[in-house]
Image (cartoon, helix red, strand yellow):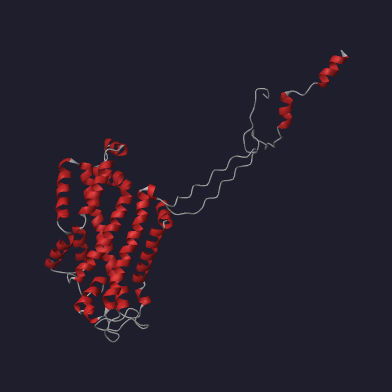
Amino acid sequence: MRRENEDRSASPPSLSTMRAEAVPELSVPVGTGTPALPLPTSPRRRLGGPQWLMLLLRNPKSAFGLVVLLLIVAGAVFAPLLTPYSPSDMIALPSQAPSADHWFGTTHQGQDVFSQIVYGARVSLMVGAAAAMLATLVSAALGMTAAYLGRWADEILSMVTNIFLLIPALPLLIVISAYLPFKNAFSMIAIIALTTWAGEARVLRSQALSLRNRDFVLAAKASGESTWRIVFGEIMPNMTSRIAAGFLGSFVGAILFEAGLEFLGFGNTDTVSWGTTLYWAQNNSTLLTGEWWHFMFPGLALAITATSLIFINYGIDEISNPRLRRVKMPKPAPKTRATAASRPLATTSGDR
């Protein structure tokens, strides 16, 4: 009997006893039945902008285009701070070459060319942006509506689009400008927008045809949504990148068309813009007299502005096509795992 008792006392402790000893004691607040566990700390979030803006800024080409365009816009806005001369005043001797007093030289009438470039950016950018916006609205409305409605509406709108596509834009602009009784910035915006919308409308129509039979469009149609609600509320948000790229293309074309019409004398020559500066340069035969600065600097302003918009379009292409992305977006911060002290205690049947 004594030997059996000694064997029992020397036996190893049971599994339940080992679990009880391994579990640490936790303080339980008064009036609650659960132990007070430390709360996991949430990860710090980095401040950042929208994804499309991050893509534009991270892409070297689009970032370069944005910087150049912002500098041009800032120069147009703060033109009185950049030059003390008025663009239409005769302030020096005529036909002077670029110097420290007049960076871009003077015109045949003694006007400062640098002042004309800086102040002329206001009219050129305003006409180009407004004409591009109006042309984009017309092309988006007609192209997406034709694709969604189909049948006779699509045939009529496609026929109108084809007619405008067959007529060359620049000769049509010249004919319309020649017969207008008044010439100002608003008439220039209207004729440029109404003659350059057809190409983008054809592209948007083809894109909308691929979205017309998607599930979300069919669901909106089955729920009784109106046509305008489906076109502009369901289809249009899925084509934002394509519309933005079309706007930039129309912006470039509108600036060049505006300068071309004014260079040919179909604009208002009393206003100061890049096109009218070129008009007076060729009217005074500066190419024959060797006054290269009168036509070179407004031409460079047009080329640099168009180039900056084209570079921005590269970033728009990356947003619409992820395969073209060279710079990957930063991944979100990983979630913190719960620590051993914050995990709930597992219970077994032997502890109950």
Q: Which residue occupies 73% across, 27% down? A: 18
Relative depth, front residue between 20 and 68: 68
Q: Looking at the picture, how far across and down is residue 83, in whole percent?
A: 35, 78
Q: Residue furthest left?
A: 179
Q: Which residue occupies 18% across, 58% down? A: 195
Q: Which residue occupies 30% across, 51% down? A: 242
Q: Looking at the picture, how far across and down is residue 120, in whole percent?
A: 28, 72
Q: Looking at the picture, how far across and down is residue 73, in whole percent?
A: 35, 67
The picture quadrant where one finds residue 53 is bottom left
Relative depth, front residue between 307 and 37: 307
Asked if 245 appears above or below 33 in the picture, the reply is below
Q: Is 139 left, or right, of 97 in this rendering?
A: left
Q: Is residue 82 visible?
A: yes
Q: Residue furthest right?
A: 2
Q: Quadrant of the C terminus?
A: top right
Q: Quadrant of the N terminus?
A: top right
Asked if 265 appears above or below 321 in the picture, the reply is below
Asked if 87 appears above or below 253 in the picture, the reply is below
The picture quadrant where one finds residue 301 is bottom left
Q: Is 7 left, or right, of 140 in this rendering?
A: right
Q: Is residue 228 visible?
A: no
Relative depth, front residue between 120 and 329: 329
Q: Residue furthest top?
A: 1
Q: How many marks?
A: 0
